[in-house]
Image (spheres, grey):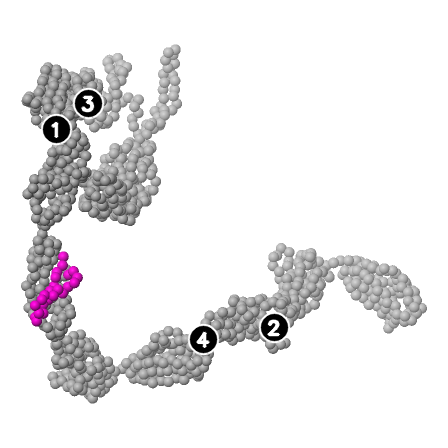
Amino acid sequence: MPDFELDAELRRTLVVRSRASIRLFVPIRGRPNPEVNWSKDDTNLKARAHIDTTESYTLLVIPDCTRYDAGKYHLCLENVAGKKTGFVNVKVLDTPGPPANLKPREITKNSITLQWEIPIIDGGSKIHNYIIEKREATKKAYTVLSTTWQKCTFKIPDLEEGAYYYFRVSAENDLGIGEPAETPEPIRVSQAPSAPENLYVTDVTADSANLAWPKPLHDGGKKNSILWQRISKALVVGNIFKSTGLVDGIAYEYRVTAENMAGLSKPSKPSEPTYALDPVDPPGKPVALNVTRHEVTLSWTKPEGDETIYTVSGLTEDATYEFRVLARNSAGAVSAPSHPSEAITYTLYSSNVVVMAGDVFKLEANVTGRPLPSVKWTKEGKELEDTGKLEIKTSDFHTILINKDSLRRDGGAYTLTASNPGGFAKFTFNVKVLDRPGPPDSLTVTDVTAEKCVLNWLHPTHDGGAKIEYFIIQRRETSRLAWTNVATDLQANRFKVTKLLKGNEYIFRVMAVNKYGVGEPLESEPVICANPYVPSDPPHQPEVTTITKDSMVVCWERPEHDGGSAINTYIIERRDKTGLRWVKCNKRTVTDLRFKVSGLTPGHEYEFRISAENNAGLSQPSPASPFYKAIDTIFKPGPPGNPRVLDTTKSSITLAWNKPVYDGGSEITGYIVETCLPEEDEWTIHTPKKGWTATSFTITNLKENQEYKINICATNCEGVGEPAAVPGTPKAEERLLPPEIELGAELRKVVCIRACSTLRLFVPIKGRPAPEVKWSREHGESLDKANIEITPSFTTLQVDNVNRFDAGKYMVTVENSSASKTAFVNVRVLDTPGAPQNLIIKEVTRDSVSLVWDAPLIDGGSRVRNYIVEKRESTRKAYSTVCASCHKSSWKVGDLEEGKMYFFRILAENEYGIGLPLESIEPIKVSERPLPPGKVSVCEVTGTSVTLTWEKPDHDGGSRITGYIVEMQSKGSDKWSQVMVVKTNEAFVTGLTQGEEYMFRISAANEKGVSDPRSLSVPVVAKDLVISPTFKLLFSTFSVLAGDDLKIDVPYVACPKATAVWFKDGVLLKETTRVNVEATDKNLLLVIKDACREDVGTYTIKLTNTAGEASTDISVVV
């Protein structure tokens, strides 16, 4: 069963850029090999694509693809076992195709509205917009109207009425602007005329009426077809006139008016509408070329002389027809009809004849025509004649062909041709002789080897009138006469014959089989079974390179001729000079032209030879190489590498170098250092006579500021090698080196140390002259605890018994006359954390305090886990814990006693323990703002002042009331202004404006703040109160025992304040030490001490103010 495998890329949609290549590679399989067919709906792939098919794969390649190559590619595999189909979707990323169905949707006198559909091919990308262009029919250049239009309709305004225009539209996507769609014909800017207005009826009679109307306001850009225009400028003599200046393709009507001495006649009736078109000559007379049962093929000449052919189908058998032709040009003009054709009538018979082999078949037909047609029978282009097997009989209107003893080759197409001067007619009889099939065609033998070959053939030309069911393949050796079946039920046209004998000569034959039997065989040419290749030529003589004591590298060249098969491997062999046997060196396949032979015996001599192997076997070995001895070759060493100056002083130069790249095959035994003055050639050796084995050396006892040439040589057992010169001429002088600090890997990271341990920082330093060293802390902390040691090559800092305050950045600065350099070491002391920061009392109430703080600056080298919150009363010394695991940086301490003073402190805790505390500086009194004052009352109001009183607050917030704030607000204002602050429960407010209305409110204040205000319930108007004096006595007689004191309290009301005068029995009362009179704003008081009989009488009190006066009498009885 045929099958194929699409990879993951082909199972999805294959996306290809335009102008790239589409490559569809599909592995296939099937036995026998399937027939592969690629197809695409609208494309001839054979002309467009390169298709390569083998037994294992099929490959379709389309180079330089375009948008039209996108679509679905169908693959079909078919063999005798079955059929399988599939497809691959291909998307080509290209500019879009032209928009579809571009046409005008609406035309007015000055605008045209176009509409179109999106392109059928979008180029694999979304259409972003359209480009619309126009051009006048008389011009060639287009004008761009819009480049960003996104809809499929567009209105073009401001066009010239009556003008012709072409339009085109292009689509644009991510890859660019695609092909345009253009209107095929120019479009005229015009519209239907407007309706005539105001129709008038005049001259009405019993059977007629005259109508009159004005011209339409607009004629739509065209001449109105019911308006007649005079075209002859002068009188026309005769009855012929040529009309000129017409518009091509427009229909016209004409009428004529006669004129004599009496005037113009009425116009004639209008002529039939006639289009202004060039005249067309009639075509030639049609001639029948071929007539079948239901159609006729006609031929005629065009008016210009070219021949045209057309087949008329759908005709009725045994009917007689005549035909004529009319010509029409591109402008629409139609010619007169041609002369009719001759009439020919046919009576036709069945076109398919089936006959068994050996039988007789007859072909006959009736033929009519005027004049009498001649008849001819043909087959395969050859005219048939009477023979003993074939007989032809023809009369005036009938012909018959008789074939006797039918054979397979008698099948085929027999053509009957009848002709006369009026034309000719043909009819074909298809004769099928049912017989065994003929021999197959084109049997070829290919891919011949020693054991197999491949047969290929084509289907028989004659299938015997039945389907070929299968093929039979046979073979025989040329030395024998008997045939042997190879395959007896083969459906395919190809077969691989196996199990052949090498060197034998074979003949193969193939026979087709249908339902009537086995057909004739087709034999092949004799074929000898032999491989088409031979062993290759021997390789060239090998050469040996890179010899050591136990290995050699053997090289050779390819054979001149590979024997017709690629070289698979090379066989390398060696032979010891002391032995006789060749030993194979390689166990694996060798395709390179060089091979390293190892495992040799030191000191032995070897020769080598090479053999090449291909599919035919091993070649003859190559000529043997000369003998080579397995021994290491020793030479003098090469020059030392990278000689350089490390340091100089006024009497010495320090050098360094690398080992030589090449040691000469022997170990380096030492080095020689020699110097020479620049102007001399005499070299002085400074290294010891025994040699110097290190790769650095200091030359001493040099002259200060003297330049020297310096060479360094390596030595081995072979001697002194090539020298390496130190670049330049180094000078023996003091070298100034800028200071350097070399921090170790541990110091470049953060140094972590546990509290109470010893911190030791060791820092190597360099510099010439020896630099000064200075240690410091980042924020200037003291280093009194530190022990600092300084030498020319290093400095150390040691701090014993470290704690959290020793953490931070330690900076070391080295400085000499050349430069200065600073480095730092971060030290983290693993200790309990420091004290938290910025303790703030955020809120205080009568029984709680809210605390807020920041994290410690020093966390002790570990994350702070939680905080501990503590409190104590100011009268005590011990703290008590409020919360031992606070995970926030805030806490509300509750259940406090109102009015008491408290201290608070916060401690941070990490994995190493509890750190230092942060304590509140001042004690915090647990109190809050007082409640608002009680009821506010007005005692007295004048034109400029008011007296207010109020009650104390219900609660003072836990702290003493320090004062009351009096605020005032005038009518029409939203602002409250503070008037005064008093400590009592009464306030006298002055500075009021007569007649103004005021509101007052009172707030209480203590050390924690100001309470909410309490307002006066009603507004106060500043005006003087006028009340005439009035007494408010409850009784008018007072009695007292002699010797007792008498006190008379007389209440009254008066505003403004009244003046009081006392009378006794009508006489002004005199005050003595025993009789006294007192007066207040609301009361009059008479005090009589040691009452006696003289005090008896009537006392009169008289009150007077600006509002009036009043008097009352009081009787006193002793």
Q: Is residue 572 magenta?
A: yes
Q: Amino acid at mark 4?
A: Leu
SS of the residue under disc 2:
strand
Specify which label sits upstream in the sequence, 1 or 2: 1
In the depicted structure, whether residue 704 falls above or below residue 571: below
Q: Nearer the viewer, mark 3 or mark 1?
A: 1
Q: Give the Cα separation between the discs numbered 4 and 2.
A: 34 Å
Specify which label sits upstream in the sequence, 3 or 1: 3
Residue count near mark 2 (Cα–Cα under 10 Å), binned few <14, some 14–19, many ≥20: many
Q: Give the quadrant of the N terminus.
A: top left
Specify which label sits upstream in the sequence, 4 or 1: 1
Q: Give the Cα separation between the discs numbered 1 and 2.
A: 132 Å
Specify which label sits upstream in the sequence, 3 or 4: 3
SS of the residue under disc 4:
strand
Q: Give the quadrant of the C terminus.
A: bottom right
Question: In this orientation, which residue lies closer to the viewer: 601 or 309?
Answer: 601
Range of the magenta residues?
A: 568-590
In the depicted structure, whether residue 816 falls above or below residue 1073: below
Q: Are marks 4 and 1 in contact (CB under 8 Å)?
A: no
Specify which label sits upstream in the sequence, 4 or 2: 4
Q: Position of residue 3 (x, y in %)?
A: 25, 44
Residue that numbered label 3 is attached to: 295
Residue that numbered label 2 is attached to: 902
Question: In this orientation, which residue lies closer to the viewer: 444 or 1018?
Answer: 444
SS of the residue under disc 1:
helix
Q: Nearer the viewer, mark 1 or mark 2?
A: 1
Residue that numbered label 1 is attached to: 408
Q: Position of residue 377 (x, y in %)?
A: 10, 22
* Image disc number at residue 830: 4
Q: Nearer the viewer, mark 4 or mark 2?
A: 4
Q: Amino acid at mark 3?
A: Glu
Residue count near mark 4 (Cα–Cα under 10 Å), binned few <14, some 14–19, many ≥20: many
